[in-house]
Amino acid sequence: MRGPDAIERSHRKLFLALQKELRYLESAKASSIRAYERAFKRSLPARSTTTTKAALVSRAKGAEVILVGDFHPFRQSQKGFLRLLKEVRGRSARPSAIALECIQQEFQTHVDYYLQGLITAEELREETAFEDNWPFPWENYRELLEYAKAEKIPVVPLNIPGRGAPGELKARDEAAAQRIAEVAAESPKLQIFTLYGELHLAAPHLPASLRSRIKKRVLIVHQNETQLYWSAPRLKNGDRPEVLRLREDEYCVLNAVPWMKLRAFLDWAEGSQEDDWDDSSDINGPVAHFAALLAEALLLEAPALDRIETRGPDELEEGGVFARSDRPLFAHARKYHRVSYLPAAQAVVVPTLSTNALTEAAALHLWARHNGGAQSQLGARLILQFMAGFLGSKLLNPKRKCNEEADMEAYLARLPREKRALDAKGRIFQRALGILKPLLHGKRSTAAPLDGGREIEALRLAGFVLGNRLSVSLRRSKSAARITQELFTSTVADPKVAAKLLNRIGAEIRAQSVAPSGKESGF
């Protein structure tokens, strides 16, 4: 098992391979875009300092306009914007508005109709000619609109016609700044959260246009800027920080590794967004690439993918004939949309083609080399399977998160005690916490097994938490590295062998006393 530097070298290899694929597309960029990009890169400081999510949220609370960078084809950009919006709104009583580049200003009335419930989201999509005016995935932005509607937050379109015309980038900055200034003047108490293309957030671009019109405080939040990621100072555990402070009113959130951003752009440019994949053979290439890099980081032999099938979403929907022992796992994968390995069928099922799902599938290909053809079993063996899948995915994408103990406990704490027995998610969380109790705390579990798919989901949650904890231990302990190799190379068809390995992993994690942050704590 290689150390953190070697794992990051795998990330760089992925990044460089994708960058090479993108060179032709990059060469086709308009000169105006290349100039805008150069100005953007020059505007970023050479040095940054590590800060915290709490510090960024506190700073955002005091700003009147928050400009958040959007890498349009990368869904994490839109999700990061929404998380920041929710965090600030949860700590401030100020009214807010959402300003979006993805819709043109002329469609303000249609946006208002949608927010008032007079038209549906699909009707809004049609009325605004969304695909004609904005070539990036509608679904990436729909979630923002749905949140605004549910929370009664006004939405302000910012874009103007003329894409590709001479000087249009500057014209769009000026038009967006003017519209934001008008809204700020009309409603001085509003806090305006703006999602706008990352290149426009260079100091001389949109921020300068905006500051020339208003005296209000403007906060700039970049997301996943590649040059900032590679130059960011390391944390004590070897990870890159999640939040950087660049200047007094300029920050950068790092909630994804750079290669994932390029992968999203390449998929979009090639017309292979998640919804467009239609054949399992399409996904074998990226899965094989991920598996080879993961094997290199773990000092393992790269798996031959032809030994184990990879079944994509279409095949999962169509169903199939499976051995009796595989049917519960298949039903669980189908119902909960989870990546899983079916031992009797020797197949990895991938119900969603996100990058996290594909990296998880790659890890399961590695793990299954020593566990193919065995009978499907609940208990320790299945926990190890899910642990290996998450751990491998986490090594390739160290920013990946899962529901940690604290997340599950917080969810249960919010439930009235009398409803816990009736809440399906709560019961699964209780069971998962019970499974983890002896492994993470050396205490006896009193949680009774659930039935069918709910038990498998609880085992998956427990496996993910253990994989998350082991990923942190890897940066601290050589013994954790050795036991990680055992996880991927041991045959655990025998329940006693599986239980013994699982208990040893639990002891290793307890010795390191690690409790990583969960989903609720980050961006």
Image (cartoon, grey):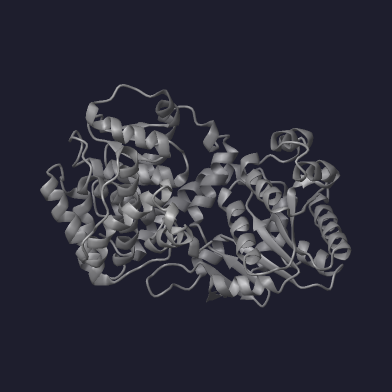
Give percent across and percent down for residue 208. Answer: 80, 67
In the foreground, 202 or 399 = 399
* Picture quadrant of residue 510: bottom left
In the foreground, 31 or 339 = 339
Answer whether residue 343 is visible to the viewer in this image: yes
Residue 282 lies left or right of residue 303; in this view the side is right
Q: Residue at x 34, y 65 (%)?
A: 4
Give percent across and percent down for residue 111. Answer: 78, 44
In the foreground, 248 or 515 = 515
Which quarter of the figure is the N terminus placed in? bottom left
Which quarter of the figure is the C terminus placed in? bottom right
In the foreground, 224 or 503 = 503
Residue 471 lies left or right of residue 40; in this view the side is left
Q: Residue at x 24, y 54 (%)?
A: 299
Give percent across and percent down for residue 339. Answer: 37, 40
Q: Residue at x 54, y 40 (%)?
A: 267
Vertical placement of 143 versus 510: above or below?
A: above
Give percent across and percent down for residue 400. Answer: 44, 56
Tally of numbered discs? 0
Q: Residue at x 87, y 67 (%)?
A: 213
Q: Which residue, as the protein is rendered here, is positioned at the far front? A: 418
* Picture quadrant of residue 437: bottom left
Answer whether residue 137 is visible to the viewer in this image: no
